[in-house]
Amino acid sequence: MLNYSGIDSILRALVEPTRRQILERLSRGPATVSQLAEPFGMTFAAVLQHLQVLEACGLIRSEKIGRVRTCRIEPGGLAPLADWIAERRIPAERHLDRLGEILAESNPSPQSPRKKQEKDEKQ
């Protein structure tokens, strides 16, 4: 059986709207835990739990200097998920491209009115 534990943990983290909002905020630049907690009506401890989930799956990283914890997006954190999606998208797109070719071969498009007119004028 294939091991998708990294992808599974990323998907579980992204299911939660609060975590997606935190990632959205961090995509604009680093922020302290207090800054991240500000827009949410939840306790500081609840925000920390969300941050721990995001950090555990590799989407963010944090560092503590003194009493201030600053979080930032982890470059490449979404790469495993993006790679997994790309691996499935490319074969599907090839199948759809081939289907389009088959349909185009079996059902030639009618001549455009302009081409038909040019053909009639030559005769």
Image (cartoon, grey):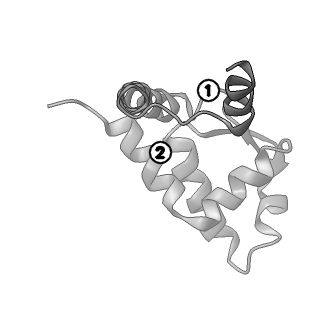
Badge 2 local density, few (<14 within 10 Å), some, or many (20+)?
many
**Observer-nearest residue: 118 or 7?**
118
Image quadrant where residue 35 sits: bottom right
Q: CA distance from mark 2 to mark 1?
A: 12 Å
Residue at x-position 37% and y-position 25%:
98
| Label 1: element kind | loop
**Observer-nearest residue: 37 or 108?**
108
Residue at x-position 52% and y-position 32%:
82
Disc 2 marks a residue whose amino acid type is Ile
Identify the residue position indicated by label 2 in the image: 10
Residue 82 versus residue 37 in the image, above or below:
above
Q: Quadrant of the C terminus?
A: top right
Q: Is residue 18 left or right of residue 53?
A: right
Disc 1 marks a residue whose amino acid type is Gly
- Whole-percent x, y for residue 21 in the image: 70, 60
Identify the residue position indicated by label 1 in the image: 76
Image quadrant where residue 103 sits: top left
Label whose residue precedes the other's in the sequence (2 or 1): 2
| Label 2: element kind | helix
Residue at x-position 43% and y-position 54%:
12
The reply to whether callout 2 and callout 1 are in contact (CB within 8 Å) is no
> Is residue 67 shown to the viewer in this render?
no
